[in-house]
Amino acid sequence: MGNSARELYERGRAASNAQRYSEARRLLGRAAAAAAPDDADLHARIAGTTAYVMAQTGEPARAEAICREALDREGVGEETRAILAGQLGVLFTRAGRLGEAEDMLTRAIDHLDGTAQANCLLNRSLVHMHRRAFDACTADLERAVTIYEAAGEREAAAEARHNLGYTALLRGDLVEALDLMAQSRPVIAAGSPVNAAMSDLDRAEVLRDAGLVDEAERLLEDVAVTFGSARMRQARAEAEFHLARSLLQHDPQRARQVAKTAAARFRRLGADSWAARSEAIRLDAEMDAGTAPPEAVFAATAAELDRAGFPSEATAVRLSGALAAIRRGGQSRPIRVPPHAPTPLRLRAAEVRAVRALSRSRLAESRRHAADGLDLLSQWQRSFGALDLQASLAMHGTNLVFAGLSAAAESRDPETLFDWSERARHLSQQVAPVRPPHDGRHAADLGELRMLRTELSGQEWTTHPRVRLLRDRVREHQWTATGAGDNRPRITLDRLREELTGDDDTTAALSYVYTGDRMLCVITTSDSSTAVTLDHAEIFRATDGLRADLDVSASIRSGPMAAVVARALDERLRRLDEALLTPVRDRLGDRRAVLTVPGILAGIPWAMLPTMTGRPFTLATSMSRWVQDRRTGRSLQRAGFAAGPRVPRAADEVRTAASVWERAVVLTADEVRVDAVTALAADVDVLHIAAHGRHAADNPLFAGFELADGTLFGYDVDLIPRVPDTVVLSACELGRSSVRWGEEALGMTRVWLHAGARSVIAAPSVVPDDVASELLSALHTGLSSGRSPAEALATASVQTGLRAPFQCHGAGF
């Protein structure tokens, strides 16, 4: 009977390790019934594993009682007592009783060896992790990896390595975190769907902290379903907790509800510290929704987190309480944040200081605190070269940017406003790309994605499991293979005026600034700068429905409705012109213009506004980048053209445009393959692509052109060793941008500019094929004769009489 009981226990333990908890409980119950009454050691081990199963399935109080009872039983061996101590350590960690957890796990580690010791090292590392004792955490995990690998425990070693990745996440090194997790996931996921979900739960945190909240939330929702199906109540509540944290960035109402549900679930499980963490998210969500409770409520939650051993999260709650008090017009005490605190916490502290100073009309002090925070964020960003990661990390600076912009707007000083306009744009413009090395698997992943993009509909493309896996791998390769680039310093307003003086007063710079509740423009010429307040309410009214009007106007060009549609669009464009350009028209005169605009204005068809008719202009990513990129002379000698499939006029368009160049290469029909087009791009000064394009709002780096063998993605562009000086995108939608985190716009134009192109000509809305063909053919006449891209485009519009939304981005002159 004893041997039978031992066998049942081992089978029950294996089922528990595989997360088959119902099966494990049955086997362990049979083992307890079959074990000899005097075999205290076996009874204790059965009890310990049973306690683990109970804790996993929502009975932590009973689990603790069973473990303590087994520990007190006479005749239990020292090794078994150590295992039970380790089991209690796990229970205490889940409940947030970190001091008791560390004591128990250390007792276990001191009396165990082999993989049993490694298991306890892995669990103690979680205690250190919660306490942000990262050196101790890393030491325990590295010891565990060594033991597991020596014992041939490949899956356990992968789990420990995954946790090293999570530690990197908490230190703020997102790339190392992703790399370690990506290495470990295949081994972990092969074990079971629950193992895969546990890995994905942590991976979703990396995506969220990187600002890729849509992808993080899809992953967390899937993970919660998996845990729910396995009846893993604690793990499901943890997934809900992280989902609420992610939703907080953009949907406070839903974040509040999800956090409330998670807190209630944790309370029922006796995990009071987790409940307090969920309450902290709920409080932040209520504050963001404008219904924050009194500061005392924040203080009570912070005190609970302090008692549970989460000092950083407690400090974050106190900062939120202070922010809520300031927003209500009250006062708050300064809150000390140590210099080694996590970067997001230090950014929050800078925000509170900036908002507090602004509420007291200490404008210079407010700007200083906001600038300190943004400098900190820039240091963090500087370690990353991937475009999507740079842009997404800007999420962490949104509130600081608006605080600084608001204080700058209050000053009405052009120099201060210009400085903050450049700061806002600098968050994701400062890092130049570094080419990742060629990787065969990366190329194969992009190739398979091309095939799937052709086969799947829009909805299937976003939800198909294989697509999601490949998209993850492509993005993660770019993150881990791309290093930091050259830092691009910001220029001052005086330096901008010097640049304009060098243009013989033929250029004006318009820096549009949005603070969250007002719109301003700093117009600068060679001799002066002026700050002008605009009617932002009228701007937003005029832009509401603009895209629909542009699309309808492009599709209805004849018949009885054409005139009606044209008049409606003209009226909307007139209103936008009045709101955006009339206040600066006298200063602008007949000069050409360089503009920087916030993301909220990214869809404006500036070329169609009356004031801009026939006027050369360029939409710069920042004034600093414009000044830097125009320092070297432009010599456009070689041109390349590619006509994609299913565009009726594409072949005629590119042949006509190519005819004005002495040195031109034209690809059509089956020649227009991804490898041929990327090779062409690396060998020419001007690249013109006439193809169907598709914007990808969830990740614009997956936007692209439809070529003969599939889609050329934004990720392909970053693999081109040398990109053209000027790129012309004659493709519907590819000039469109996604606004991310208030001030940021990211689209296919940005992909080419980030890759090193000096200027990109594209349209933010649909353009009829015949209009695009005629206008862009005329554009090349100007380019081939030596005109700058912006001047060539303006001249082409005048000569053809065509008014279209094509506009020049980057350093157009």
Image (cartoon, rainbow, N blue to C red):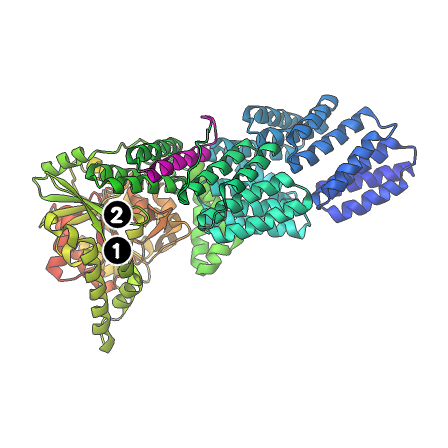
Disc 2: CA contacts within 10 A as few (<14), some (14-19) or many (>=20): many
The amino acid type, in three-letter code, at marker 2 is: Val
Give the camera-side residue of 495 and 659. 495
* Quadrant of the frame with the N terminus: top right
Image coordinates of residue 308 in percent, x first then y, are 61, 34
Of the residues shown, which amino acid type is indicated by label 1?
A: Ile
Query: At which x and y percent is residue 780?
Result: 16, 52
Whether residue 439 is visible here, answered yes or no, is no
In front: 562, or 517? 517
Residue under label 1, please give it. Answer: 604
Q: For mark 2, give the secondary structure.
A: loop
Mark 1 burial class by Cα count in 10 Å: few <14, some 14-19, many 20+: many
| Residue linked to disc 2 | 597
Which residues are the magenta region?
A: 338-360
Is label 1 in a helix, a strand or a loop? loop
The quadrant where residue 17 appears? top right
Residue in view at x 92 percent, y 33 percent = 38
Return the residue found at the far left: 504
Q: Quadrant of the C terminus?
A: top left
Q: Does residue 292 appear anywhere in the picture?
A: yes
Q: Position of residue 87 (x, y in %)?
A: 73, 33
User: Which residue does the image show at 20% across and 69% down from the upper left?
Assistant: 567
Mark toward the start of the polypeptide (1 vs 2)? 2
Residue 786's label in the rendered image is none
Residue 274 to residue 98: above or below: below
Apparent side of residue 230 relative to residue 297 in the rendered image (left or right): right
Q: Quadrant of residue 752?
A: top left
